[in-house]
Structures are given as structure tokens and as C-alpha cells.
Image: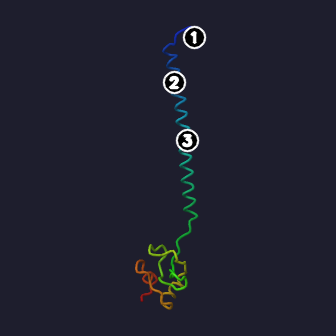
Amino acid sequence: MNDDRPLTRVDMLRFARRVVEHQAARQLALMDRWIADEERREAERQRRLATRRAAPEWLIERGLNGRSAVYVHVGGCAGTGGRAKAVGRDQAVRALTEGGVAACPLCRPDTALGVLE
């Protein structure tokens, strides 16, 4: 622009348009960054869900000594302690019928297995 002449209304409107255009470009770049971050978080969440192991069907909870069995649980039972071990259906049935292991009173694996005491 030439400093000799005063700014016209058109000059001021063109300047305002350039400012708005610059601000809009910055805001769009920010939004694109937010979208990319959220897409990355969602992809990570989906990947974690896909790789998470499925809960075992049956668990046998061991006592404090680590040897004696205390309860048989249905997999995913909220009453299992940190000493539960995943087992197969046959082993869970044997523990209930032959091993004398009690069924968890919360999840009732004896009912789920069709073995009533």
C-alpha cells in the first residue's frame, strides 16, 4: 500500500478478511489436531479391547496356603480373590463332585454346571 493516500473502506475490509481467513485457518488446524488425537485414542481403545483376553469360564480359588481349594467360581465372578486359577469345565465339575470344593455362594457354579450338591 502507498502511505500517501488514506485507507479506504475497501482496504479495511480486505484487511479484515485476511485476518479472519488467518484465524479460521488456525482454528481449523487446531480442530484437525483434536480430531486426529481423538481418532488415535479411539484406535488405541479398540486395539486394547481386541487384545484383551476373554474371562475364563470357570475358576478355582485357592486358600491362603496356595494348595487347598476354597471355592469354584463362574468366570468373571465378583467374589473371586486374587488367588483364583482358570480351569476347564471338567476340572470344575470334578472339584465340585469329587474334590469336595464348595461352590461360590454368589455365582453358583454348581447350578451353571448342572451339578447340585
In the image, 3 versus 70, the foreground residue is 70
Which label lies toward us, 1 or 2? 1
In the orientation shown, which residue stands out farthest toward the front?
65
Q: Callout 1, which amino acid?
A: Asp
Quarter holding the N terminus is: top right
- Please state the horizontal and vertical placement of residue 56, each as a whole percent of the image: 53, 74
Task: Please say if 32 is above or below 54.
Answer: above
- Please state the horizontal and vertical placement of residue 100, each as a whole percent of the image: 48, 90
Label whose residue precedes the other's in the sequence (1 or 2) = 1
- Please state the horizontal and vertical placement of residue 81, each as a whole percent of the image: 48, 75
Q: Callout 3, which amino acid?
A: Asp
Label whose residue precedes the other's in the sequence (1 or 3) = 1
Give the residue number, with chain letter if any, for mark 2: 17
- Marks 3 and 2 sit apart, C-alpha to C-alpha, by 22 Å
In the image, 11 versus 95, the foreground residue is 95
Q: Residues within 10 Å of mark 2 (few under 14, many from 20)?
A: few
Quarter holding the C terminus is: bottom left
For residue 79, what is the image quadrant?
bottom left
Label whose residue precedes the other's in the sequence (3 or 2) = 2
Give the residue number, with chain letter if any, for mark 3: 32
Task: Please say if 64 is above or below 11.
Answer: below
Callout 3: SS: helix
Give the residue number, with chain letter if any, for mark 1: 3
Residue at the spot 53% in from the left edge and 28% down from the top edge: 21
